[in-house]
Image (cartoon, grey):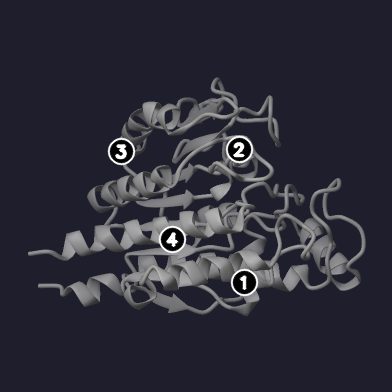
Amino acid sequence: MTTHATAERRIGVYGGEQLARYGFGDGHPFGPDRHNAFWDTLTEAGLKAKIQALPPVRAEDRDVLRFHTGPYLEQVKQQSVTGLGYLDYGDTPAVKGIYESSLFVVGSTLDAVAQILAGELTRAMVPIAGLHHARRDGAAGFCVFNDCGIAIETLRRVHGIRRIAYVDIDAHHGDGVFYAFDDDPELAVVDFHEDGRYLYPGTGHAHETGTGPARGTKLNVPLPPFAEDEQFFRQWSAAERFIEESEPQFILLQCGADALAGDPITHLQMSLAVYRTVSTSLCRIADACCEGRLLATGGGGYNLDQTARAWTEIVAAMVEATERGAEP
């Protein structure tokens, strides 16, 4: 029989200076303070003793190149040295050292994937990750290297995992992931976001369900500005069925906290109940479909207190689900 203590410690959470460093300065919405706010809240909630606190891991260029193009990787390297200009058209500054800090985001996500598949962890959370806007050939929306896309390519090419479910509840549509795999029938996508007519990046319409052989494998759920929990939950049950029917071998959750009421750059009005419910639900599906394999990445969220609390809810739900699974 598995003990509660053993079960609890099978939840890995990544943190450390190299992850905290990913950001664009104190005046930018994506600043370095998000990491510490989360860890303080996690500790205050009494959860630090129930998880494995894991250090950041640095990726190699070859990991990045599973998703991104060589010319773009070289651009990031060069502008990371000078710290001049933007990596995109005005959202993502080329601050000094951004190449190195981005590698720690990617490496931590990939280490979590490897540890989950090896059975060292059941589930994991990488708070400073989930950079879902970056395209194969460029940065976008505060995202330099798309660790979600890199994780999907790594699951396929390195680990032989074909059927993956990618669930995204960030207020912004996960366009960098969606369009990179819109013709991939083995990647099921469920993306809840604010309607693109009102918020960056302006994509993720309900009629976009995948192309070619992947038609019907993608579910976009655009929500109107100021939507609250009721509107989310009204559609979540169908999303659960959609994920279950895809029979995933691994589940990725991008749990951006900018869908919460009070976020300074979005309009959705969700409560923490959405984050707890989604995490609990995905733990249940993961336990039924894929040996519990669930990796959460933090994504956006620009109200520090709310973001820290939302990510803590994600971890709390993971711990509780694992405790329940360990009961005789």
Q: Calculate the distance from the C-alpha at mark 1 to the C-alpha at mark 2.
A: 23 Å
Residue projecting furthest to the left: 328
Q: Which residue is mark 3?
A: 244
Asked whether the viewer can see residue 128, the reply is: yes
> What amino acid is at disc 4?
Thr
Q: Which residue is mark 1?
A: 19
- How many numbered markers are drawn? 4
Q: Position of residue 282 (x, y in %)?
A: 34, 47
With respect to residue 31, does 192 lie above or below? above
Q: Calculate the distance from the C-alpha at mark 1 to the C-alpha at mark 4.
A: 17 Å
Determine whether, in the image, residue 18 is placed left or right of residue 274.
right
Q: Earlier in the sequence, mark 3 or mark 2?
A: 2
Q: Calculate the distance from the C-alpha at mark 2 to the C-alpha at mark 4.
A: 22 Å
Element type at marker 4? Answer: helix
Q: Residues within 10 Å of mark 2 (few under 14, many from 20)?
A: many
Residues under numbered marks 3 and 4 in contact, where contact means CB atoms less than 8 Å apart: no
Q: Earlier in the sequence, mark 3 or mark 1?
A: 1
Q: Which residue is mark 2?
A: 173
Q: Residues within 10 Å of mark 3 (few under 14, many from 20)?
A: some
Residues under numbered marks 1 and 2 in contact, where contact means CB atoms less than 8 Å apart: no
Q: Calculate the distance from the C-alpha at mark 3 to the C-alpha at mark 4.
A: 25 Å
| Circle 3 or circle 4, nearest the eye | 4
Q: Where is residue 204, by image quadrant?
A: top right
Asked whether the viewer can see residue 59, the reply is: no
